[in-house]
Amino acid sequence: MTADLKLFSISHTKANVEIREKFALNNQEIRQLLHQFKEILSINEAMIYSSCNRTEIYYSADSLKTNDILQVLCAHKCLIPSEKYKEYVEEKESKASVKHLLCTGIGLNSTLLGDHQVFGQLKKSFEISKEEGMSKNVLNSLMERFIQFYQRISSETEYNYGITSNSYAAANIIQKEYNKDSNKKVLIIGVGEMGSDVCYFLSKFNTKNVWVTNRTMKKAKEMSRTYGFNSIDYGLHAKKLHMFDIILTTARQQAHSYKSIHFNNKPPQLVIDLCSPRTVSTEVCNLGTKLLNVDDLGQQTDHTILRRKRTIPQVESIIEEETNFFTENFNQTVYIPSVSQATA
């Protein structure tokens, strides 16, 4: 049954941020697509993982449904025709799909090596799949093995040493800019998982003059109280962007919500856009602003990354062992519980 496992992937491996953001999915869209896959493509088991770096569908089927999935995705995102996007799609099946998930789940396939956030994001994707009744024997067994594999990597290697995530990289860049002039003002737009992590790291760096805003202001005020930051009303923040020297946005909005006109000809020195789709127009660069997106963060290296790289041969050996184990024992893994239940 492992042979039924398939993968559809659009990631930074083949697609730049302009292409990837076209296929970025929020949780509501993921739920809708899972039902479309079932109703339109007769796929009864699937998990969709969408982040800044990738949109991937792990599914169970007798044969690859790459073209069909691409058509459904394009229709859902109002992208026509689907043919032009084929070159950005990567497909895998059976053992190669298993190995890909293991590599992706520990951030080995990320632009930022060992990105810690991927593990939690994948688990969330799995939870949504289960809630929608789209995770059964194949995905249940695969994700159970993946969690055991992740724990093994943590206990047997130093691969998870230190902190590597887009949030940490962004906070580190902000801190370096702040250290040049402690009078600089920082604005964090959006305090979801990523924005909250940035705030946490900035507090650890002892960064001052930080303001936060969020659609739900209660959460922004809680964050402000927790870290001693300031808050600014979400409904007013767009009119006050010119007040800040450094701006980071993680709040998904309509593409290119922030343009040159919003800065009143007083551009910030640095803008970090971690959204997918991106929310800051590249025209702000014409004002002299340094604009970074998630691909730019992946180019950041430090001693943590270098130390992690030294463990890769050991990690790859474990990945190979785990991939072979799952592939060879999957049928038995599925069968044993049913026997136990029958015996009980």
Image: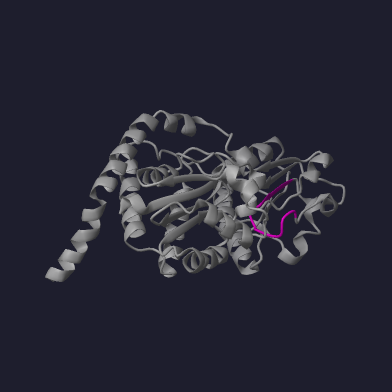
Give the tally of numbered discs: 0
Query: Is residue 195 toward the left or the right of residue 262 in the image?
Result: left
Q: Is residue 185 left or right of residue 316?
A: right
Residue 118 point in image, percent of width and height: 47, 49
Q: Can residue 83 be seen from the camera position used here?
A: yes
Q: Provide residue 143's location: percent of width, then percent of height.
A: 35, 55
Looking at the image, which residue is at 43% across and 69% down?
Answer: 131
Name the image colouring.
one colour
Identify whether 40 is placed above or below 290. Answer: below
Residue 13 on image: x %, y %: 55, 39
Q: Is residue 253 magenta?
A: yes
Q: What is the quadrant of the N terminus in the image?
A: bottom left
Point 49% across, 30% down: residue? 303
Most foreground residue, 214 or 183: 214
* Helix, strand or loop for the magenta stretch, by majority: loop
Nearest to the observer: residue 87 or residue 216: 87
Q: Pick whichever, 201 or 121, lies toward us.
A: 121
Task: Confirm whether residue 233 shows in the render.
Answer: no
Q: Is the residue 247 above or below the residue 225 in the image?
A: above
User: Is residue 114 or residue 304 the one in the foreground?
Assistant: 114
Left or right placement of residue 283 versus residue 103 in this view: right
Quarter residue 318 falls in: top left
Q: Quick check: is 111 in the magenta stretch?
A: no
The image quarter containing residue 178 is: top right
Range covered by the magenta-colored residues: 246-256
User: Residue visible at 79% across and 41% down?
Assistant: 285
In the picture, measured across the screen, residue 100 lies left or right of residue 280, that is left
